[in-house]
Image (cartoon, grey):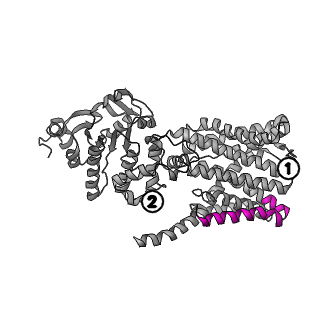
């Protein structure tokens, strides 16, 4: 479904992504792992159009989407959440998701219909599916960190995506919130048939929900394969464990 | 809308309609000025408070609207109604042109570029004696008979301001308004949910330019003059202060700010030439103690009062 071929990007001489490649099939959950600064977020930014790559191609459903603006990428039904929480702080939880739904319905140029009357049902459905319905009237700024990360996912769902990119969905969450978030990701994959690409530092989560894993080190793809293959790969062990020859548990 | 707000609004409208009956002429003029400045500040707030765009030279659109209407009235010989429509439309078009140039820059840089380009327009108006009257401006503008008396000018200003405020209120409550506020809070996020951020900002700038032009045309009706100071950058600063003082995250805050500043300028300048000093001190106090402005503070208190019992119920 998504095919990234030999993507490179450097920032002021620093090679953030170096000929990385990645393939995701429909319905899969794929994890990208790698040490801090490996280029995971930059890779996601390139796929979603926030950063323009120096070279390489991004194909989505056999269509070249390299270098499209983020809003155009979104309209091809790729949605994402961010590592650092990106929500509309002054607006309510409901409005945060509603704007996303309105945007997908292409109603954002409507100047005179009151927003309050539009897209309420779908918005509430999404909020219910992620468990935020009871907090819908709260300003996003007053949510807990964990809830804001979930709100991000809800906003991404507002675009009715086929392909969901999650940048460290559980970062900074308390243990219980993390479990709920993992359940949510599994549920989204199962019930909505979403294809999911995510990156994460917690190996337990990665091996728990991913079908396949791509490992990045210093901007390069080290390996992409099943959990088993990755677990016993020497290069991965080098990167994570400084060369000691123990299988990751 | 609840019954209470409808009653409150109607009462307010009646009070404003009765002003010319019992207020002396000078005060009728003053309230007209407050209304049109309030409209001007509200139009700025559409992009500043709701859109998060640093529109630092809003006065240009006000001035362009006023000059547009005036030049149509004095030079074209076309019907006056057409002139009053032309002014705001020219401002809107100018908003589009300036917007297309400036919107490529973000935040403060947008504001800086706008100030410099706007000042260029001011310089042209200031110098072009043959067309704009140069630094003398244009006086004794022939407004239609119907609007010539201070009373009728007041009623015209009041009705147009009310209608404009209503339209802006509708816009803020519309999907476009929601999206605009989303862009203010987080442009990257907006882009990533499929919104073409620049285009939405551009439309907001055009709308703000239009309503600033309406305010400019109203000034022509009320004062029968135009002068280059109307598009000087110090006025822009004053309009920004109106928004901040009144509360830039509230709808009526800018109106309140306009009332406060016009009143201050009128009454304090009778005692001292340094009325701006008084304004400066007030502004500092507001920034330190009421960062959301006067109305923003009131709203916070009201909401706080309403929220407390709700949370007890749960």
Q: Chain of mark 1?
A: B
Crowd class of label 1 (few under 14; some 14 to 19; many from 20; radius 10 Å): few
Asked if labels 1 and 2 touch by Cβ distance under 8 angstroms, the answer is no
Residue A144, position as x, y percentages in the image: 37, 59
- Seen in the picture, residue A161 relative to A119 is either above or below; the reply is above
Residue A156 pos. (x, y %): 39, 45
Which residue shows up at 76% across the image and 53% down it? B157
Q: In the rendered structure, does residue B19 fall within the stretch colored magenta?
A: yes
Give the CA distance from mark 2 to mark 1: 49 Å
Chain hosting mark 2: A
Q: Residue at x 68, y 43 (%)?
A: B210
Residue B242 falls within the magenta-colored stretch: no
Q: Is residue B138 left or right of residue B108?
A: right
How many numbered marks does the figure carry?
A: 2
Res. B17 in view: yes
Q: Quadrant of the C terminus of chain B?
A: bottom left
| Relative vertical location of residue B96 with respect to residue A95 in this rendering, above or below | above
Residue at the spot of label 1: B146
Q: Secondary structure at mark 2?
A: loop
Residue linked to disc 2: A137
Magenta segment's dominant SS is helix
Q: Which residues are magenta?
A: B1-30
The local crowd at label 2, few if under 14, some if 14 to 19, many if 20 or more residues have their Cα within 10 Å, is few
Furthest residue toward left: A246
Question: Would residue B307 appear left or right of B120 to someone viewing this image?
Answer: left
Q: Quadrant of residue B249?
A: bottom right
In front of the other: A144 or B287: A144
Residue A121's tag is: none
């Amino acid at each position: 479904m998504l095919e990234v071929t030999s993507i490179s990007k450097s920032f002021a001489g620093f090679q953030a992504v170096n000929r990385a490649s990645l393939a995701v099939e429909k319905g899969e959950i794929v994890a990208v792992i790698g040490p801090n600064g490996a280029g995971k977020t930059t890779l996601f930014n390139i796929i979603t159009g926030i950063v323009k790559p120096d070279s390489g191609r991004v194909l989505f459903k056999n269509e070249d989407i390299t270098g499209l603006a983020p809003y155009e990428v979104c309209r091809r039904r790729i949605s994402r959440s961010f590592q650092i929480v990106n929500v509309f702080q002054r607006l309510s939880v409901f409005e945060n998701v509603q704007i996303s739904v309105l945007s997908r319905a292409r109603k954002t140029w409507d100047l005179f219909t009151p927003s309050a009357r539009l897209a309420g049902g779908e918005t509430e459905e999404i909020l219910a599916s992620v468990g935020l319905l009871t907090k819908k009237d709260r300003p996003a700024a007053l949510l807990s960190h964990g809830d804001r990360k979930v709100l991000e996912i809800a906003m991404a769902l507002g675009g009715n995506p086929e392909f969901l990119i999650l940048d460290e969905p559980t970062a900074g969450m308390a243990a219980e919130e993390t479990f709920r978030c993992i359940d949510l990701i599994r549920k989204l994959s199962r019930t909505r048939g979403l294809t999911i690409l995510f990156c994460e530092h917690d190996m337990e989560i990665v091996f728990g929900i991913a079908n396949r894993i791509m490992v990045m080190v210093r901007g390069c793809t080290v390996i992409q394969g099943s959990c088993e293959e990755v677990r016993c790969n020497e290069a991965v062990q080098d990167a994570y464990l400084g060369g000691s020859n123990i299988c990751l548990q | 809308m609840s019954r209470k707000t409808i009653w409150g609004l109607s009462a307010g409208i009646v009070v404003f309609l009765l002003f010319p009956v019992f207020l002396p002429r000078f005060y009728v003029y003053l309230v007209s000025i407050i209304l049109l400045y309030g409209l001007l500040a509200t139009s700025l707030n559409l992009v500043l408070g709701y859109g998060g765009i640093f529109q630092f030279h809003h006065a240009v659109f006000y001035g362009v609207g006023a000059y547009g209407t005036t030049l149509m009235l004095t030079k074209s010989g076309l019907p006056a109604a057409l002139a009053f429509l032309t002014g705001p439309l020219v401002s809107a078009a100018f908003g589009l042109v300036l917007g297309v140039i400036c919107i490529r820059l973000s935040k403060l840089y947008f504001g800086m570029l706008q100030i410099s380009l706007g000042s260029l327009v001011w310089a042209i108006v200031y110098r072009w004696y043959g067309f704009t009257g140069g630094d003398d401006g244009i006086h004794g503008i022939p407004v239609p008979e119907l609007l010539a008396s201070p009373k009728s000018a007041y009623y015209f200003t009041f009705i147009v301001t009310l209608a404009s405020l209503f339209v802006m209120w509708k816009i803020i409550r519309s999907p476009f308004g929601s999206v605009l506020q989303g862009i203010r809070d987080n442009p990257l996020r907006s882009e990533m949910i499929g919104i073409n951020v620049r285009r939405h900002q551009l439309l907001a700038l055009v709308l703000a330019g239009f309503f600033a032009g309406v305010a400019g045309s109203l000034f022509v009706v009320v004062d029968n003059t135009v002068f280059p100071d109307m598009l000087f950058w110090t006025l822009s600063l004053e309009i920004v202060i109106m928004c901040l003082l009144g509360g830039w995250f509230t709808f009526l805050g800018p109106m309140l700010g306009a009332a406060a500043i016009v009143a201050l300028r009128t009454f304090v300048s009778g005692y001292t030439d340094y009325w701006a000093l008084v304004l400066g001190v007030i502004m500092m106090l507001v920034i330190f103690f009421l960062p959301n402005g006067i109305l923003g503070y009131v709203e916070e208190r009201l909401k706080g009062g309403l929220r407390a019992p709700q949370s007890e119920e749960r």
